[in-house]
């Protein structure tokens, strides 16, 4: 299935560009997520179907944590693909424009799949850089002055970060001369042979480099602009999958530290930047005026929570995996719903938007329920993942950190709820033309994602628990 994961979307994208016809564009849009769903099921059921040259096989793998992140990416990818049908309709794009958008989406997703499946550190770096180039085109897709500025800011900051990560890989190579390999399995198995000094220095560079892609504070400057200026389905991909793929790269490097018994050094950096991200998100959330930027700062907050989970070792790693799933699905639902709001009110500002429940009740309720899911109201699973992180703080002897942890979460939740409820329950718009029923594609993806979250929140079945736990075992 690995060959289909990489080649099928690219081939379909090229065909869509060469033959801009509606039926071809729809196939190119909807077939790749179906292929990815099949691939995830095949790997989960241990069905091997690899059609790659023998020399290429060692460079890609489907380990337990890779399968987990790939599955989350597939859920977001499928939701975005369906929602894009409404996005095309609402913007009245030509077939050529649709084909370009579809091709850029496919190239972006293939790059993220490469990051997730890469079994070689340098190869993973190549795909991380590819995600920057492919996603920058999507951020600028609507060709506005503000989106052009956001794209260049994104390219510049992330390229500097990725360059630092490359320096880190070179330093790691210096420290691991006796291993003479950058395959992750070799680095894990022979981590004790890596010079501790060079390993720590290399981690500092890789941490900053991949941390820039993740959008962790204080190296997050690109994220609010890119998320707010990109088309809403692209924002969903950026928050729900791009950040995760870069995070997985950092988890693989953290595994080297765990194998070398040096995780105390890296855990401190994760904990420090995690709480700094929570603090910055809380400060900005209280004075936010743009609802897409609000969602962007929420992403920074949740990346901070994930970093805290990494720092808590075996006690926090299950919470980390559960939070990755919950954040990705709920944030995708929020960004897609923000596309409905932008279509109805033609503004990204919070102030002009009111009476969503009157102008489009389904959008209004999706906006409210998705917000409740992201701030962790029961029964949604973010409530459980945050609870488990607090428990992990206690188990690690860091119970005093639960106080600022709760404080920042409450501030962020208050800021988001204040904006969302104002937008949903305000007075109905005077312009009756705002009252609109957008169609199946504008609501169905969010409903499915929220349903999945609800099911996981009320009952983590043995199959789901096993899936999460197998991914968590990667760092144990």
Image (spheres, rainbow, N blue to C red):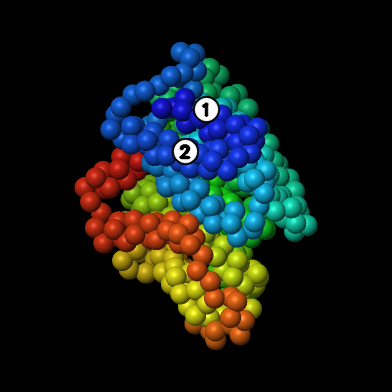
Locate the N terminus by quadrant. top left
Q: Regarding mark 2 in the picture, which secondary structure is present there?
A: helix
Q: Residue at the location (53% across, 60% down)?
A: 335
Q: Residues within 10 Å of mark 1 (few under 14, many from 20)?
A: few
Viewer-closest of 397 and 365: 365
Relative height, residue 243 to residue 173 (above, below)? below
In the image, residue 429 lies at what x, y percent?
58, 82
Relative height, residue 123 to residue 328 (above, below)? above
Note whether residue 449 is visible. yes
In the image, residue 450 lies at what x, y percent?
38, 60
The reply, left or right, for residue 22 in relation to residue 447 is right
Q: Quadrant of residue 103?
A: top right
Residue named by callout 2: 31
In the image, residue 302 lies at what x, y percent?
49, 58
Label annotation for residue 316: none
Relative height, residue 452 to residue 198 (above, below)? below
Q: Regarding mark 1 in the picture, which secondary structure is present there?
A: helix
Seen as rendered, the residue at the extreme right is 145
Q: Quadrant of residue 162?
A: top right
Label annotation for residue 7: 1
Viewer-closest of 224 and 281: 224
Locate the C terminus by quadrant. top left
Viewer-closest of 234 and 198: 234
The answer for how far apart the CA atoms under marks 2 and 1 are is: 12 Å
Note whether residue 415 is visible. no
């Amino acid at each position: 299935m690995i060959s289909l994961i990489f080649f099928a979307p690219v081939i379909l994208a090229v065909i869509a560009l060469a033959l801009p016809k509606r039926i071809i564009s729809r196939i190119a849009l909807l077939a790749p997520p179906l292929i990815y769903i099949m691939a995830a099921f095949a790997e989960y059921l241990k069905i091997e179907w690899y059609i790659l040259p023998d020399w290429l096989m060692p460079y890609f793998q489907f380990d337990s944590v890779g399968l987990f992140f790939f599955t989350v990416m597939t859920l977001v990818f499928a939701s975005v693909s369906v929602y894009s049908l409404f996005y095309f309709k609402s913007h009245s794009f030509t077939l050529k424009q649709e084909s370009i958008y579809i091709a850029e989406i496919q190239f972006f997703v293939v790059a993220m799949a490469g990051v997730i499946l890469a079994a070689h550190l340098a190869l993973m770096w190549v795909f991380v850089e590819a995600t920057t180039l492919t996603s920058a085109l999507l951020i600028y897709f609507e060709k506005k002055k503000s989106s052009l500025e956001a794209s260049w800011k994104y390219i510049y900051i992330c390229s500097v970060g990725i360059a630092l990560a490359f320096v880190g890989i070179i330093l790691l190579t210096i420290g691991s001369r006796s291993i003479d390999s950058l395959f992750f399995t070799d680095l894990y198995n022979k981590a004790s042979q890596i010079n501790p000094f060079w390993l720590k220095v290399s981690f500092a560079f890789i941490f900053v480099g991949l941390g820039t892609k993740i959008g962790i504070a204080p190296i997050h400057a690109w994220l609010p602009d890119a998320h707010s200026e990109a088309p809403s389905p692209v924002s969903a991909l950026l928050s729900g999958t791009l950040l995760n793929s870069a995070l997985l790269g950092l988890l693989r490097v953290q595994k080297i530290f765990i194998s070398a018994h040096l995780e105390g050094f890296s855990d401190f950096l994760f904990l420090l930047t995690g709480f700094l991200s929570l603090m910055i998100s809380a400060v900005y959330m209280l004075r936010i005026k743009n609802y897409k930027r609000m969602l962007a700062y929420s992403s920074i907050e949740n990346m901070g929570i994930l970093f805290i989970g990494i720092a808590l070792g075996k006690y926090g790693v299950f919470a980390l995996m559960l939070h990755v799933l919950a954040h990705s699905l709920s944030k995708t639902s929020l960004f897609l719903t923000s596309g409905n709001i932008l279509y109805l009110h033609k503004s990204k500002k919070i102030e002009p938007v009111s009476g969503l429940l009157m102008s489009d009740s389904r959008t209004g309720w999706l906006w409210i329920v998705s917000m409740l899911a992201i701030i962790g109201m029961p029964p949604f699973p973010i409530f459980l993942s945050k609870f488990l992180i607090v428990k992990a703080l206690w188990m690690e002897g860091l119970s005093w950190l639960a106080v600022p942890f709760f404080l920042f979460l409450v501030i962020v939740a208050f800021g988001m709820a204040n904006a969302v409820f104002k937008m949903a329950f305000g007075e109905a718009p005077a312009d009756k033309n705002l009252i609109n029923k957008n169609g199946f594609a504008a609501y169905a993806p969010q409903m499915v994602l929220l349903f999945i979250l609800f099911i996981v929140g009320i009952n983590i079945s043995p199959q789901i628990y096993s899936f999460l736990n197998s991914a968590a075992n990667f760092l144990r």
